Amino acid sequence: HPEVTHTKGGLQMLENFVLGVCGCERLWTSESIIEDAVARIKEQVGDDEVILGLSGGVDSSVVAMLVHRAIGDKLTCVFVDNGLLRLNEGQQVMDMFGDKFGLNIIKV
């Protein structure tokens, strides 16, 4: 598993395969991937508003930030406290996304 951090030389293996074996070029950066995603979101959403379920996990957090970058205040996130969260986790999600990042977020 060269993709995991504990594989010695894993990144080098992936680079050798992608660049050397497959002949791909380094044409992208993290910022260009983000810009492309934001552009696609803007195109898909248009003038509509979006409701997004936000768990505070990696996937929904990344989506929330990309959608917020694309459409701003037309995004409303819904965070559900299901009673099974770690101590203070719900408040941490509210503080992080509401206060720190300025997203519209409703806690249920």
Image: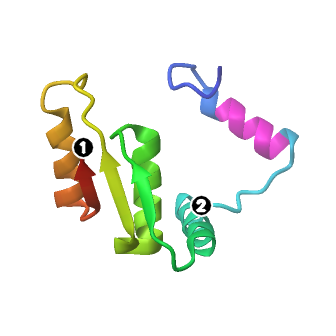
Q: Amino acid at mark 2?
A: Ile
Q: Position of residue 97 (x, y in %)?
A: 26, 54
Residue at x 59% of width, y 60% of height: 33
Q: Which residue is mark 2?
A: 33
**Label number found at residue 108:** 1
Question: Quick one: label 1 or label 2, which is nearer the N terminus?
Answer: 2
Residue at x 23% of width, y 44% of height: 93
* In the image: residue 24, left or right of residue 13: right
Q: Is residue 34 above or below residue 88?
A: below
Pick the front one: 105 or 36: 105
Q: Is residue 84 above or below residue 42?
A: above
* In the image: residue 93, left or right of residue 53: left
Q: Amino acid at mark 1?
A: Val
Any part of residue 97 in sight: no
How many residues crowd around disc 2 within 10 Å: few (fewer than 14), some, or many (20 or more)?
A: few
Q: Main secondary structure of the magenta part?
A: helix
Q: Residue furthest bottom?
A: 47
Residue at x 24% of width, y 65% of height: 102
Residue range in magenta is 12-20
**Label number found at residue 59:** none
Which of the image's four quarters has the C terminus?
top left
Q: Is residue 56 above or below residue 69?
A: above
Which of the image's four quarters has the N terminus?
top right
Q: Position of residue 16 (x, y in %)?
A: 75, 37
Q: Secondary structure at mark 1?
A: loop
Residue at x 22% of width, y 25% of height: 83
Any part of residue 89 in sight: yes
